[in-house]
Image (spheres, rainbow, N blue to C red):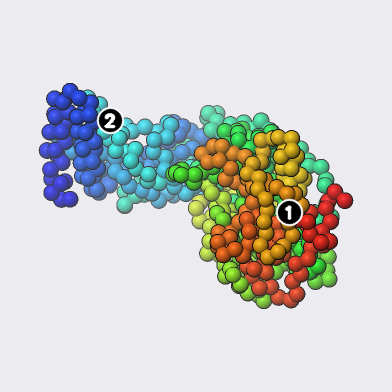
Amino acid sequence: MRALGRLIPLTCPLLTAAARILSRSAGRGLASALCVAALGAQVPGPVRGIEFRTVPPDARVRPFEALVVQVRAVGEGARLTGGAAPVPLKRGPAAFHVHRHDGGWVSKPFSQQGSEGIQPRYEGPDGLEARLLTMSERQSDLSDAVLYTAPGREGEALLTATLEGVSATLRIRVDADAEPTVPSERVTFGPQPAAPDPYRPLAERYAPFVAQETWFQPKADYLARFDADGDWRGDNNWDNTPESSSQAFVYYAAMETETHWFLIYNFFHPRDYSDKCVAGTCHENDNEGMILTIAKDGTPWGHPVAMETLAHNKIYSYRADPRVRGNFHNLDGEVEFVDGTHPVVFVHSGGHGVYGSGQHSGYSLSADHFEAGTGVTYVYKGVAERPRHPADRNVGYDLLPIYDHWWVRSQQEREAGGAAFSGYYRYQPQGGRPQASYLFVAGAFLSRKHAADMAKPFWGWHDNDTLKQKLLAKGQWGLDPAYAITRNLTLPGPVSVRYVFNPYLNAPGAVSEAE
């Protein structure tokens, strides 16, 4: 490598001259590619300086709105035509510091290279060097940018970035007259009609405290409803996200056996996104969630004993009763509560996996702090509020019944056609358990952007491990939680798997909501 580094100043000019002589485009392309490779090999020098690039480029932003800040490390490199010149270094991420405690918020880093509005600024006299450097930069997937969210006050904000001991400070102007960076929302939902659901008070009492991490597409991280864009199409939710409603909703379902209640909460997002979308890792629509198991104890509310969460087809288990033990699944921690009854869950940004408190969580309740830098906390208020910014706190959400909004509608679509659901399949439970109340159920939300039909309502969820071992079938964790909890964990006391109420199954004693 050292020898190659010494040869680069000589090699690139020779290759450049050869490219001028060769008349065929293949020869010119080969010379350019070799030169880019050589240039990349010589770059690992020290950082000499830091440059900022912002979107918008004037670094002006409205209160509570956001701008992209990209840090570019600069070092010394040999020009293709000889001499020294500043070159971009593939370095990152930098450490960011907001100067005032009320000076705004910074997200976790992401890769912004090649995005609209940020272009390389290294221009040579003939443009060749700039083109080669641009080609080299496109090979980089470094997390070199952050999303800066402005505070509510106008004035100047200072943001310092430090990389390998070199620091630079960006002056940001928070100005109400700046160009808006957040599109206006065109959909607003009024108060939701009260559903005649006897389990609603139970769902409200135990409605989770949601710590939702945010990233560089915060609108895609906010809790939403499927029809946030005002229609019931699943294949336009990605494109409509910027102008859709950011009012907060959580979907819920309730089931009951002779010994326990089971509350299922679904957290819907319009996009599953990343800064490195490859092979279906990003997709339109996203829906993951949790199941809270509550033991009956003669009181109106019972007491929680366990919580299970779903993150990317894997179940995580937490106990609220010290007598709970692992079974097929090991315990991942203890359930943490707000005000005694609201379990704390952490939802990752981008992919939206759900976790309880503990090693997988990126939020500290005691410190009210997101490790990644930005996030919104949601609490149940019975009112669907909007986050003011990607680091807001105690935003109120409302509950929506899954049975009415998704289960019944999905069957109506199957019979009459529609564009909200897809992937219908026949539920085939393990253990000789009851079948679904419909012969075929929708396994996914209809989606087409990036990857098709990847997001699932709770009756399409599965855990990779229990599915592989044939302990639970696809959809069984959500459709039959009483049976599933006996496979996953060991609960204290008697655990009945006979349902008193489960409108999703043809179960003895399970009364349908239509009756």
Image side of residue 466 versus residue 294, left or right: left
Instruction: Write down the residue under mark 2.
Output: 131
Looking at the image, can residue 143 be seen? yes
Tag count: 2
Image side of residue 84 versus residue 64, left or right: left
C-alpha span from label 2 to label 1: 60 Å
Is residue 436 positioned above or below 141 on the image?
Answer: below
Q: Which mark is residue 436?
A: 1
* Identity, as a three-letter code, of the amino acid under mark 2: Arg
Label 2 or label 1, whichever comes before in sequence order: 2
* Identity, as a three-letter code, of the amino acid under mark 1: Ala
Quarter occupied by residue 208: bottom right
In the rendered image, residue 475, in percent from the top left (x then y), is placed at 65, 55
Q: Residue at x 21, y 33 (%)?
A: 30
In the rendered image, residue 121, in percent from the top left (x then y), is placed at 32, 32
In the rendered image, residue 224, in percent from the top left (x then y), is placed at 65, 43
